Image: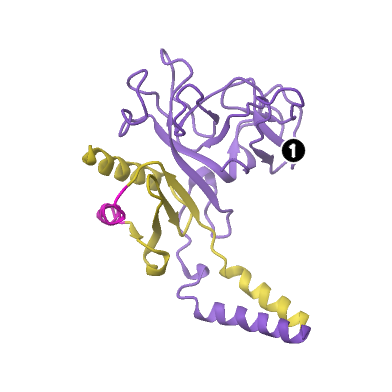
Amino acid sequence: MKKILIIILLLMIPTICCADVLKIPFSCWPVELRDEFAIRGMKVDLSPLERTEDSWGFIKSNGAEFELNSYRAVTQEEFQIIQDVTFKIELEKN
Amino acid sequence: MRKFSLSLFALLLCVGVAFGATSGNRQDPGTGDILGQGKYQSDAHKIFRMVRYVPVTWGNSATLAADSLVVWDVTNDDGVTVTTTTTSYDSTVAGIIVTNALTPDTDGNTAAQDAGKDNWTWLQTYGMSQVNYLATEDTATAGDAFGTSTTAGEAARFFPSTSDPGLNGKAGFFYDASTAGADDVEVFLLGLD
């Protein structure tokens, strides 16, 4: 029995997906963020339950700040896009 | 009973895998090129924060290069501003910036006033990263703790102070043996987030 359990656990290792978490100190409307990312070609979901093959990540709103959870390592270009989108929304609010 | 528990556990694991909508290994691994790492799904999970950079002295300040070890700014104590230090093992250590940080356009701005400006960057607070290692140090062994050093942005081996609470800033540990003065040494950040 123990052997079977170990084999199952070993088989599960490749299914573990490591992601990045980006914490952003500005509040936002998640829908607005999703739309702005979509314009720039990034499919960002409002919940991990909406994930599809095309998803880049999902948004988690924490009130005065929000988090982006990616499904893969973030690139330098994506860092810049996220910053641009955040400031576009933030500056439009004020 | 023990057999039953193990069987049940194994069954639950199988069901979990079978019903996963899209398992991680089926997702596009992406082309993440941050720090030359992040090309595979198996890479360590990382945590980043969007932060504002304000140099210690505004006049004649220069761009802060990626891979610099930075500290939280205790003058602009707003929780989003980082700066550099020349204090070894500074307890305010914040993490490593992974994109170049430009200097502010105006001196004395608040974080809100700087929204949309160029002096925002990305701070890594957890996971595999890289940093420049102080030239005057001895060789670091894999697993040695590191913190800030007497050179702004560079790391040194960390030795906790028993007398000064301001000198207990451990940022993480070296992942490999590292020669003094080496650039881009592999480290792991932890305990900062």
**What amino acid type is highlighted by mark number 1?**
Asp
Please, which residue is most extreme toward the front here? Answer: A63
Residue B115, image x and y in percent? 32, 33
Q: Is residue B179 visible?
A: yes
User: Compared to B180, does B98 lie above or below?
Assistant: below
Q: Which chain is yellow?
A: A
Q: Is residue B133 left or right of residue A61?
A: right
Q: From the top left corner, tell me how far across and down residue B92 is, in percent.
A: 58, 29
Residue extending furthest toward the top: B59
- In the image, is B84 to the left or to the right of A34? right
Q: Position of residue B73 (x, y in %)?
A: 50, 26
Q: Residue B2 lies in what quarter of the image?
A: bottom right
B71 over B3 or under it: above or below: above
Question: Which chain appears purple?
Answer: B
Establish if B63 lies above or below B7.
above
Q: What span is colored magenta in the figure?
A: A28-41
Residue indicated by mark 1: B144
Name the one closer to the observer, A31 or B188.
A31
Q: On the image, which quarter does residue B183 sit in?
A: top right
Q: Is residue A82 magenta?
A: no
Q: Position of residue B117 (x, y in %)?
A: 32, 30
Residue at 44% x, 46% y is A23
Q: Is residue A52 visible?
A: no
The chain containing the residue under callout 1 comes to: B
